[in-house]
Amino acid sequence: MKCFGVLGLASVAALVAGCTAPSAQTRSGPLALIQTIPLNGISGRIDHLAVDVQGQRLFVAALGNGTVEVVDLAAGKRIAGIKGLKEPQGLCYIAELNRLVVACGGDGTVRFYDGRTLQPLQTLGLGDDADNVRYDPGAGRVWVGYGSGGLAALDPHSAAVVANVKLKGHPESFQLEKNGNRIFVNVPTAQEVAVIDRDKGAVIAAWPVRTALGNFPMGLDEAHGRLFIGCRMPARLLAYNTESGEKVAEVPCAGDVDDVFYDAAARRLYVTGGMGKLGQGRLDVFEQGEADRYALLAELDMPLGARTSLFVADLGRLYVAVPRLLLQAAEIRVFKVGCP
């Protein structure tokens, strides 16, 4: 089954205007647009997002604005911010410690903040282009990709580096197994996925990415042993078997893809990219079937440059960041995830 993204003029106008009501398309589809949250005064590119589920807060890395914005999800408004940052890119909120971790590409720092007051706690000069951030709750470690080829593990209490794994190029998105000890890392300049044993702190395998270039975003279906890679040239979604390291599926997806999330409950994939068929952003929803078949369920037109997103399973929401471009205002679009 394929739900498609050719909206009527009224629906397009409603989306552009930031209407909070679901469109006719999304009411019967796998996603429903239920809210838009304005980010007034925020300009430039928006990078990654993080969430405080208990506190109902969304953290937004406003890279081009040099800030991290804090959004109250219950109230539907921006409530605070951290200013004076140099290209904030990666974010991670550690609920058990009430810590916010921010990786800044402009100066290579990783900054730790009190999650309640947003007051700075520690700052580590990690290296050039500090980027994606993930937290390993089992080991109590924060992993950060940086530089021309490094993945560092940090102690979240002291911000000290406790492990450093060398890679063949700058790491983009990476995923940690919850029931295993591996980390899967996109290394686009090397055209590969590096597989790290985080107990050993070493690369144990490298899976080639040959049919498409620009493997930036990544999602993981650990239960079924599938790793999902978003590539940009050409725009493709690839699926790999995590036991064999072999590619098992490939389908076209949104252009300039920057985020891929797997919804385990619905067995769906949410893919956001900054370039659709008409040059605007796009949100794709794929259904995971048997025998590694991935069917396109929905293809939603999005504003220009809306390529970063965050799926929060605990809230049943997908958050899409819309940057300010020309007459287009910056905002967060909130989608309710539909039942299969």
Image (cartoon, rainbow, N blue to C red):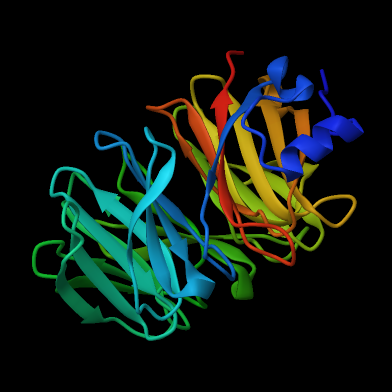
Q: Residue 241 appears at what percent x and percent y? A: 57, 40
Q: Residue 238: where, in percent of width, then height?
A: 69, 46
Residue, far left = 158
Instruction: Say whether residue 298 is left or right of residue 47.
Output: right
**Side of 202 where 163 appears, left or right:** left
Q: Residue at x 57, y 51 (%)?
A: 331
Q: Position of residue 84 (x, y in %)?
A: 35, 79
Let me know if residue 26 appears in the view. yes
| Left or right of 124 on screen, residue 340 | right
Which one is nearer the viewer's eye here, 332 or 206? 332
**Quadrant of residue 25 in the image?**
top right
Q: Image point 50% across, 76% down: which residue?
A: 170
Q: Is residue 172 above or below residue 77?
A: below
When asked about the image quadrant of residue 274, the answer is bottom right
Does any portion of residue 6 appear in the rendered image?
no
Q: Residue at x 45, y 77 (%)?
A: 87
Q: Quadrant of the C terminus?
A: top right
Residue 156 is situated, as x and y percent measured from the top left of the image, at: 15, 61
Relative depth, front residue between 258 and 177: 258
Could you tell me which quadrant the N terminus lies in? Answer: top right
Position of residue 255 relative to residue 21, above or below, is below
Q: Nearer the viewer, residue 53 or 225?
A: 53
The answer to whether residue 66 is left or right of residue 321 is: left
Q: How many marks?
A: 0
Camera-nearest residue between 328 and 7: 328
Quick check: 200 above or below 10? Answer: below
